[in-house]
Image: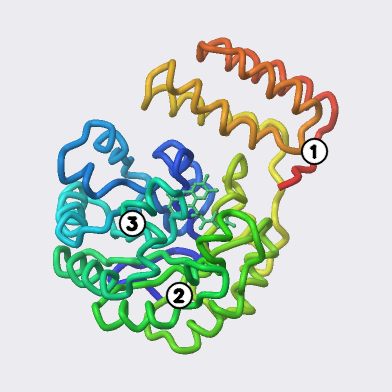
Amino acid sequence: MNIGLLKLDGRAFLAPLAGYGDSPFRILCRHYGAAMVYTEMVSSLGIKFNNTKTFGMLVFDPVEHPVDFQIFGARPDAMAQAAEVLAKAGVDAIDINMGCPEPKIVKTGAGSALLRDLSLIDAITSAVVRATRLPVTVKIRKGFLLDNNVAEEILAICEKNGVAALAIHGSTAVQGRSGSKDWDVIAEAKAKATIPIIANGGVKKAEDAKRFLDYTKADYVMIGRAALGNPWVFEQINDVLGGRSPREPGVDERFRVMQEHVDREVALKGEVIGVKEMRKHLAFYFRGLPEATTYRGRINQVKEADQLKKLLNEYRALCTGASEEVHHDA
Ligand SMILES: Cc1cc2nc3c(=O)[nH]c(=O)nc-3n(C[C@H](O)[C@H](O)[C@H](O)COP(=O)(O)O)c2cc1C
């Protein structure tokens, strides 16, 4: 199944990840076989009012295609205008955020607040679909409060308005980033859906993704936290879905990817911000490696890209000595 006219080569997508899912990280995930990459959420009002910081977030590289650009907001007109701007910028799809539980987003009526206002969902989805010929996707949680389940009602609105695919995170907004993930809500929506369903929430490793797809019968699976410091998870998922054993990258490959990630962040954001951004990513890349706590502490002291790369070389030598094949605790 494709998403609108988009032909996708695989079933695993990179989830939108604010603070992480920038162009350098998306490039690495695509390289390792993510079938589509979602951007981190971008404010529709920021796009409408030419906010400089927002425009910095619109950068993407041709190798990222297909890119699904996520916007958030509560005003149908601003969401529609943002979609027009993004379509002109050459993105492949527009995604509408209806799941963010952050209070600063919710209090503006955007993100997961929309789950409490189905008529606004109706207005936003129809305005955005009318504004662009690109496929429009929607990402929801199953509801706002703990016992809410509005997934099927939202699915019906999306289908009526021409939304191309629906991603469902099987938890509620009040659960935030913890709590159990409800696979049944996704399976039930899929059983009724005429558009592709993207299953999201709680995949930790490649085998989970296959179980999730098998159980829910969803068309695609979306991976968030399991991709952090671990972009090769997409290759592993593709392997498992293809009946092959997933490949664990060795020490050299892991460090090559880290170095490439540093280079790309610094090239895109400059040395000061690039190095700062990489501290967050490297904390994830180091998971499961020997003496990770020590090296996390050391990279937090580093300010220059050259120093950071030297430190990574030193750490690689230590890890190579410790083991030829590191078992990564994903
Ligand atoms: C650091 C972080 C940032 C996130 N940013 C966004 C975002 O910008 N937009 C969005 O729809 N969801 C966002 N999410 C939610 C994820 O896309 C995903 O739905 C959630 O993490 C569950 O999937 P997972 O268990 O595979 O991580 C974020 C999650 C995390 C951990």
Residue 174 spot, x, y in % from top left: 54, 60
Towards the viewer: 104 or 96? 104
Q: What residue type is labelled 2?
A: Ile
Contact (Cβ within 8 Å) of mark 1 with mark 3: no
Residue at the bottom extreme of this rendering: 192
Between label 1 and label 3, give the one nearer the viewer.
3
Residue at 81% across, 29% down: 290
Residue 238 spot, x, y in % from top left: 59, 61
- Residue under numbered circle 3: 110
Tag on residue 325? 1
Tag on residue 197? 2
In the image: residue 70, left or right of residue 99: left
Q: What residue type is labelled 3?
A: Ala
| Disc on the earlier residue, 1 or 2 | 2
Q: Around disc 1, counting alpha carbons within 10 Å, would you say few (fewer than 14), some (14 to 19), or many (20 or more)?
A: few
Between label 1 and label 2, give the one nearer the viewer.
2
Residue 130, image quadrant: bottom left
Asked whether mark 2 and ligand 1 are closer than 8 Å, the reply comes as: no
Does residue 242 sit above or below 178 in this rendering? below
Does residue 110 sit above or below 324 in this rendering? below
Contact (Cβ within 8 Å) of mark 1 with mark 2: no
Residue 210 spot, x, y in % from top left: 64, 69
Q: What residue type is labelled 1?
A: Glu
Residue at 39% across, 45% down: 104
